[in-house]
Amino acid sequence: MRNILIIIFITLGVTAGLKLEAQNVPRHEIGLRLTGLEDFDFIYKQEKASQKFFRHRIGLINFGVNGKDNNSVFEFGLGYAFGIENRKVINDKLKFIHGFEPRILSQYRSMDGNTIGWGLQLGLGYVLGFQYDFAESFYVGIETIPAVTYARELEGQNKGAYNFDVGFNSSAVALTLAYRF
């Protein structure tokens, strides 16, 4: 009888431990973030603590080839942002999201194989938005990221040109569709 009780307690302890361990497994989220109908980013989030997530955004800013007769212009831009997203629960489906998000963007342009421009932009933004959980594994979010940015042309026709900008652009409101696993 004593051995049976010991086995039951060990089984209950292991089961409870597995449930606690399963609750501590960080959640992951992956999705598509759309700004207008032309710009999109891929977004990945990993839970680090309750209602706190690391977020990574990567986006192809532009890619194109334009040409006329014997001239062609090639353009390519890529951006990456990393931040910490905090969530404040409003109700069981709605959350307010906010947090800092540093970013880096690079754009390259060439004409007939010769560099006509290569620029770099650094920025620090602050995410402000809402997230609505419409299912256990899916949510939709709306956000904007006011930012301070510094851009500099490193090569090309406008080498040395720079731009410093502080902005809150309401036309840059983004819609996010994400899957949680």
Image (cartoon, rainbow, N blue to C red):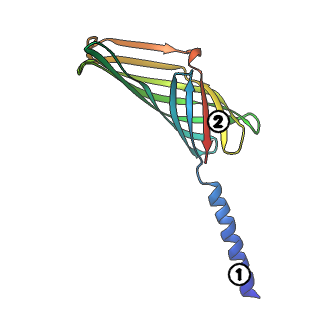
Neighbourhood count class around disc 2 (C-alpha, 10 Å): few under 14, some 14–19, many 20 upward: some
Residue 173 lies left or right of residue 116; in this view the side is right
Q: Quadrant of residue 127?
A: top right
Residue 119 appears in the picture as rendered = no
Residue 97 lies left or right of residue 42; in this view the side is right
Please name the amino acid that badge 2 sits on: Arg
Picture residue at 66% right of the left edge, 70% below the top: 14
Picture residue at 26% right of the left edge, 11% below the top: 157
The label nearer to you, 1 versus 2, is: 2
Residue placed farthest to the bottom in the image?
A: 1
Picture residue at 68% right of the left edge, 68% below the top: 15
Residue carrying label 2: 87
Q: Secondary structure at mark 1?
A: helix
Q: Secondary structure at mark 2?
A: strand
Q: From the top left corner, tell me how far across and down residue 19 is, in percent.
A: 67, 61
Residue carrying label 1: 6
Q: Is residue 147 above or below residue 18?
A: above
Residue 75 lies left or right of residue 115; in this view the side is right
Q: Quadrant of the N terminus?
A: bottom right
Picture residue at 61% right of the left edge, 38% below the top: 178
Residue contact between numbered discs 1 and 2, judged by CB atoms under 8 Å: no
Residue 19 appears in the picture as rendered = yes
Q: Pick whichever, 93 or 66, lies toward us.
A: 66
Please name the amino acid that badge 1 sits on: Ile
